[in-house]
Amino acid sequence: MRKRPQQQRSRVMVQALIDATGKVIQQQGLDNTTTARIAEVAGVSVGSLYQYFGDKDALIAALMKSLADDIGAGLKRLPIMDSVDMTSMVGSAIRFGFAVLHSRDGLYLELVRNWHRLPTNQVVDVLQQHFMELARLYFLRHHQNYPIRNLEVRVFIVTNSVLFTMVRHISQDNGLIRENELAEELTRMVAGYMASPPPPIEATP
Amino acid sequence: MRKRPQQQRSRVMVQALIDATGKVIQQQGLDNTTTARIAEVAGVSVGSLYQYFGDKDALIAALMKSLADDIGAGLKRLPIMDSVDMTSMVGSAIRFGFAVLHSRDGLYLELVRNWHRLPTNQVVDVLQQHFMELARLYFLRHHQNYPIRNLEVRVFIVTNSVLFTMVRHISQDNGLIRENELAEELTRMVAGYMASPPPPIEATP
Amino acid sequence: MRKRPQQQRSRVMVQALIDATGKVIQQQGLDNTTTARIAEVAGVSVGSLYQYFGDKDALIAALMKSLADDIGAGLKRLPIMDSVDMTSMVGSAIRFGFAVLHSRDGLYLELVRNWHRLPTNQVVDVLQQHFMELARLYFLRHHQNYPIRNLEVRVFIVTNSVLFTMVRHISQDNGLIRENELAEELTRMVAGYMASPPPPIEATP
Amino acid sequence: MRKRPQQQRSRVMVQALIDATGKVIQQQGLDNTTTARIAEVAGVSVGSLYQYFGDKDALIAALMKSLADDIGAGLKRLPIMDSVDMTSMVGSAIRFGFAVLHSRDGLYLELVRNWHRLPTNQVVDVLQQHFMELARLYFLRHHQNYPIRNLEVRVFIVTNSVLFTMVRHISQDNGLIRENELAEELTRMVAGYMASPPPPIEATP
DNA sequence: CATGAATGAGAATTCATTCAT
DNA sequence: AATGAATGAATTCTCATTCAT
């Protein structure tokens, strides 16, 4: 039961702490992220940190939410829906994805890497929901006759496939595969898959 | 001349420690895996642990190598190459993947989840190499005329896509998406992608 | 000429803080009583708390004094002196004691429990002094010929014996001993003791 | 689930830690007793402390048990039962009580003062049980005709009365009341009470 | 070689008190 | 005077690693 920041200064501090958390995670890695270091980077005492966040996890959760909002906003600004064909649409999304993963000096990268120990759902779900909506709109507009049944599954597969493939690639600075090529191929795989007809309905015995 | 018993004993102890490491990770999760517990499960003293492994990381690395070998062997035993068409081949591989992830009481699951903090490369690389070889053979046999240039990229994409999509699905016991359906859709995506023609060669200016 | 409003406000605030202190101790126990919580319950800022009380201890001391006054007043209102015989007098006092300990939702209980860390003397002394006076009056009225020399010691013994025996009993909700029975036996012990003749004067060599 | 000390050295260390705990509590008071200080006084690292005791409370519990055992042994050695009359018997017990409270440089004093926050039951119960037994034997021997019904209540009252009266007296180094006098008066009160006939059985309506 | 007791550098969290606004 | 945000020392507990026996 921490106090909600009501004052101007509070809001500034909360933001400073969240920013510091991001900075520390990005610079030292999640494993070396201590509350002491976060407070220090935020230019604040540990006590203040705990004034605003019940514990370390709450702070990290706030960071996740903040990033999720940012990503959501970024996605909304993308003119993806203007794309006429699936390939260019998927291509835009994937290029956007790479851009995000490279942004903030690798913070996103570190977060996705540690997805399992973090309330990542907040972030990944944002992506998934966004792409879900995107896909729905697209099919509504271009293939009204296609009642794509398994859209959920497809979006789940596609989101995770692209995300983790990108992260793995960046993480191991694989010199053999250029990012451009990877993006193109991912685009081809995903576009091809999304455009494919749904499977026939299984007969239930 | 008999083998020196020390060597014999050593090998047994090393193996016991590696096994114990796997068991502990699987039972308590990577974060709660302590050297003390590993030694205890191995029925050995911590001191002995450090006799054979320079530090905790070395022990984990050894576990990874051990698993990589196992998976390699398991993969070789798979009659995947007998499949005539791409779809059934990919399908087999994916079902095998799910089986592995569910095996050993979730050890593999926990390892993939924490891939970034582990020398997982050893394991994932094994997979990738294996599928690389598999793909090469397949195309050699069935599409000799196709000089698939970007096979490496494709295998990279496909391996990571499938692996992490599966892990994410299992990790969040998503009741909405059944594992069977996921497997089928993954198969469709991958098979469709692998069978698609390579992109035209870009003109280099 | 009106009272200066500051003084007025001060007195209100001081009282609010003391009341809040009692409430918090009673609700959360002395160990979980923080200045922050006290201020919150008093509907006042921590800063104000320190305006009126030098530190936490001063606040608690004020509470003790306040309670001591209350108890003193309560005791004076008791028609104990009307009792004719020792037993009924002691009985009344003990029943009154139990009532106090059960009052204020256990605040007194918690205070006596922690007597050593608190300036409890103020409170217990009030009791002791009161009973001293009571005893004096009683013996004056009924046994004028008895120059009870060691009345101080007797009252000291009796006060502490009864007080802590009651507190211990309540604290361990001892199902085996009913409170009524305890009160009766305490009464018998105390009345018997108080009515007993003083010891002979020792010969000083 | 800490290891039980099996080795010689372990037992020594466990004892050293318990002793150190007593020493620190006695020297600095319970409130200033930290694990760090205990370890330091025991000439041991904090880590070792936690090797043998799950947490601070476990350590304190062990101290209590140790003291309880000591007191129990001390009580058994007392030739109390040889006393012919109640007064001399009670007197012996009370003098023994004072001796214990003064022993170990006030450790017992500090423990009883903080009885509410400690697993004191172990210790106080030992006393109570012992006196219970003592009383039983005494009445069996001397007043076989007295079927003292409410012995439990009496022993409860007497034990707590004496114990806390003594502790309060020592704690406030009351110059007005000499310890000898207090002991004598306590003896008179207790002996008189214990020797008094039981109350008539109440008629149940 | 094997043992496991001992180490001690951190890490998270709390709370009385201060002081700028 | 009042506020409540900010402070930071202090406390408990963990665990990889070492080393005397």
Image: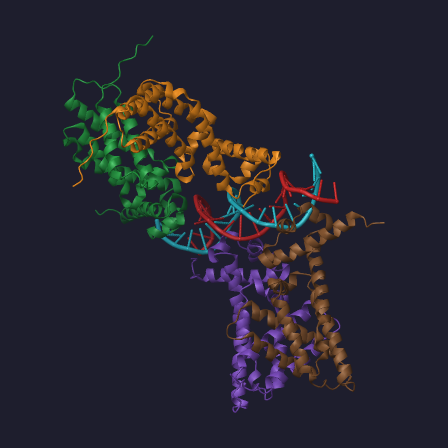
Chain colours: A purple, B brown, C green, D orange, E red, F cyan
Locate the C terminus of chain C and report the quarter of the image it occupies: top left
Determine whether, in the image, residue A204 is placed left or right of residue B163.
Answer: left
Position above or below: B51 against A200: above
Which residue ends up furthest to the right in the rendered image? B1
Determine whether, in the image, residue D75 is placed left or right of residue B79.
Answer: left
Q: Position of residue B119 (x, y in %)?
A: 69, 61
Determine whether, in the image, residue B23 is placed left or right of residue D119.
Answer: right
| Residue B77 visible in rendering | yes
Q: State how many labels appear.
A: 0
User: Residue at 69% of width from left, 53% of height from top?
Assistant: B16
Q: Quadrant of residue C117?
A: top left
Q: Position of residue F14 (x, y in %)?
A: 57, 49
Which residue ends up furthest to the bottom in the rendered image? A145
Q: Position of residue A48 (x, y in %)?
A: 49, 54
Front in this rendered view, residue A176 or A152: A152
Which residue ends up furthest to the top in the rendered image? C205
Q: Quadrant of residue C85?
A: top left
| Residue C73 visible in rendering | no
Determine whether, in the image, residue B18 is placed left or right of residue C67.
Answer: right
User: Residue at 49% of width from left, 35% of height from top?
Assistant: D63
Q: Position of residue D21 (x, y in %)?
A: 51, 35
Position above or below: B44 against A127: above
Front in this rendered view, residue B98 or D161: B98
